[in-house]
Amino acid sequence: MIYVSESAKKQINTIMTTSSKIDASYFVRVSVTSGGCSGLSYNMDFDNESQPEDQVFEHNGVKVVTDLKSFLYLFDSTLEFSGGLDGKGFQFVNPNASRTCGCGESFAV
């Protein structure tokens, strides 16, 4: 399962309702790629096309989709959002990460 915090849900809903390019057919796609100072990086985008190997979750009213390989790294993670002057935007709280970089955008297992 991939979880979505209340703050992330509110921000996702705001983006989806204010963007003229995103409609109700879209969902949140998250993935993990090689790169970043800790070895792996998080990616998040809006998408409306499913792939054959996609893992689909719905938590807190938000549909989250990831590929199978990324799910192995993201299992039991929570998508958070932090705003304000010192906020970091969207970030993952990942219990599988053995270390993260200072900015929180990359991690290692």
Image (cartoon, rainbow, N blue to C red):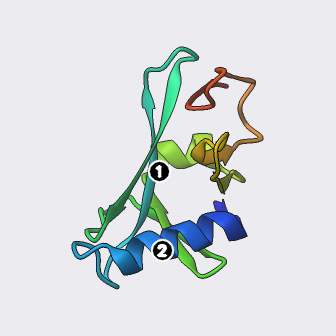
Relative to 108, does residue 69 appear above or below in the rendering? below
Q: Residue at x 52, y 26 (%)?
A: 40
Quadrant placement of the N terminus: bottom right
Horizontal placement of 102 versus 37: left or right?
Answer: right
> In what element is the residue under mark 2?
helix
Q: Return the residue nearer the eye: 25 or 86.
A: 86
Question: Is 29 on the left-hand or right-hand side of 12?
Answer: left
Q: Name which residue lies at 61% across and 41% down.
A: 88
Say if 95 sits above or below 22 in the image: above
Which labelled disc corresponds to residue 95?
A: none
Name the spot of residue 86 as percent of width and height, x first.
67, 39
- Front residue of 14/68: it is 14
* Callout 1: SS: helix
Expressed as whole percent of the image width and height from the top left, the position of residue 3 reads 68, 63
Q: Eyeballing the image, is 33 above or below 31?
A: above
Q: In which quarter of the image is residue 109?
A: top right
Instruction: Name which of mark 1 and mark 2 comes first in the sequence.
Output: 2
Q: Do the residues labelled 1 and 2 touch (CB within 8 Å)?
A: no
The residue that mark 1 highlights is: 68
The image quadrant that residue 52 belongs to is bottom left
Which label sits on residue 14?
Answer: 2
Q: Which amino acid does the dot numbered 2 rest on?
A: Thr
